[in-house]
Image: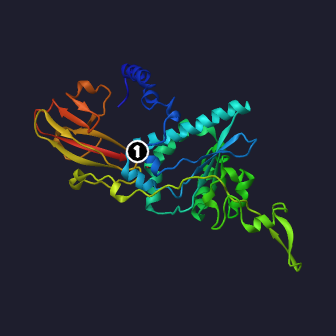
Amino acid sequence: MSISEVDRVRIQELRELVKNEFRKLWNLDTVADEKRDHPVHKYWKFGLTGKASPNSTQIVNIEQSGGNDYWGMLHAFPINQILRARVHDLECMLRAVMELEKEKGEQCHVMYIMDLEGLTMDRRLTTLLTGGLAAISAFMSEHYVEMVSSFVLVNVPSFITFLWSIAKPLLPERTRNKVNILGKNWKEDIQKLANPEALPSYWNNEGEDGVGLKLLKILSEFKTCSQILIEKRFPIKICIIQPFKADIERGQLVPKEEYYVDTALAKAKILQIPAGKDDHVDISVPEQNTQITWRIHSDGHFAFKLLKVNDNENSVSEENEQRIYPLFSVRNMFKNYKIDNLLIIFPFSEKEILIFYKISRFF
């Protein structure tokens, strides 16, 4: 269905009226001043540690991508609340960058270090990447990506390297150049990018602390990767790794008791829709002013519409279907509707008609 010029004007007017509502409702201008106490923050910890080095124009942020219980969070909290909690952290990053720019008098950025320890390739991961996390990542990419100078991946599973080799050619050059995947010697390589003071102490091996191992004390007179003699019999090369010192809280698992359970879904019809496909549900409207209500629970990106089937034909095709929702001139078609638990009343039905609730999946 094409959009008329009248509707285009109305749409633009609506955009002008609501364009600042998001900023005002979520207090984006002052959210960085607020206390970090959203329930989601208990499970998604803050990762900003400070400047990469004393003279650096980069601020380090540690993202526990492999350790965070994203699956649990998405089952315990609505996606808009997870996003709201995340916006607090993103605005704090932006505030830190702006303050450093005032200090340095030049453009500054965030070094976004993603720790993938614990990440496994399974159905949960693919569901997350095509569902709720995709929406959060898209929001960050659209509004905050320019403040990030690089994405540094550490503790990288082998399957990530394989996936990156496939995805890399498909990405814009500017995006590709921001991604830095460190190899098996990442603990050494990361210190070329940031000082130990800005890197998390939980990376230390057992027995290491903020002061260092006895071996490091003995070798303190040597430079990194110095040649030394052991019992004067043979030389070896030791690369000194300084203990990491930034104190970062570890994310917690979301207790399954906190998972949201909707008992109304026990009798719900479940559709399995592959990417790029669609399916439908039949709804009979027996008489005038019939009211239907529905809710959608999904694990991906879906679109939907209501179609009236002409001549009571029990099939869906372009020839015999008429879209009745969504429409831009909705007031002329429906007596009442609300977007909460989507309700529609059909005032035009004088005899039984058949409605198809058609659902399409993007990816």
- Total label count? 1
Of 4 and 15, nearer the camera is 15
Horizontal and vertical percent for residue 177? Answer: 68, 46
What's the amino acid at mark 1? Ile
- When asked about the image quadrant of residue 211, the answer is bottom right
What residue is disc 1 on?
Answer: 79
Q: Is 261 drawn above or below residue 227 in the view shown?
A: above
- When asked about the image quadrant of residue 81, the answer is top left
Horizontal and vertical percent for residue 218? Answer: 80, 67
Horizontal and vertical percent for residue 87? Answer: 49, 39
Q: How is the image coloured?
A: rainbow
Is 261 on the left-hand or right-hand side of 27? left
Secondary element under disc 1, as helix, strand or loop, is: helix
Q: Is 31 drawn above or below residue 300 in the view shown?
A: above
- Residue found 68% across the figure and 61% down from its top: 183
Q: Is 326 drawn above or below residue 360 in the view shown?
A: above
- Residue found 53% across the figure and 35% down from its top: 32
Of 121 and 80, nearer the camera is 80
Horizontal and vertical percent for residue 148? Answer: 63, 41
Is 315 on the left-hand or right-hand side of 191? left
How busy is the neighbourhood of tag 1: few (under 14 within 10 Å), some, or many (20 plus)?
A: some
Q: Is residue 234 visible?
A: yes
Q: Is 7 drawn above or below residue 192 in the view shown?
A: above
Instruction: Look at the image and tell me in which quarter the N terminus lies.
Output: top left
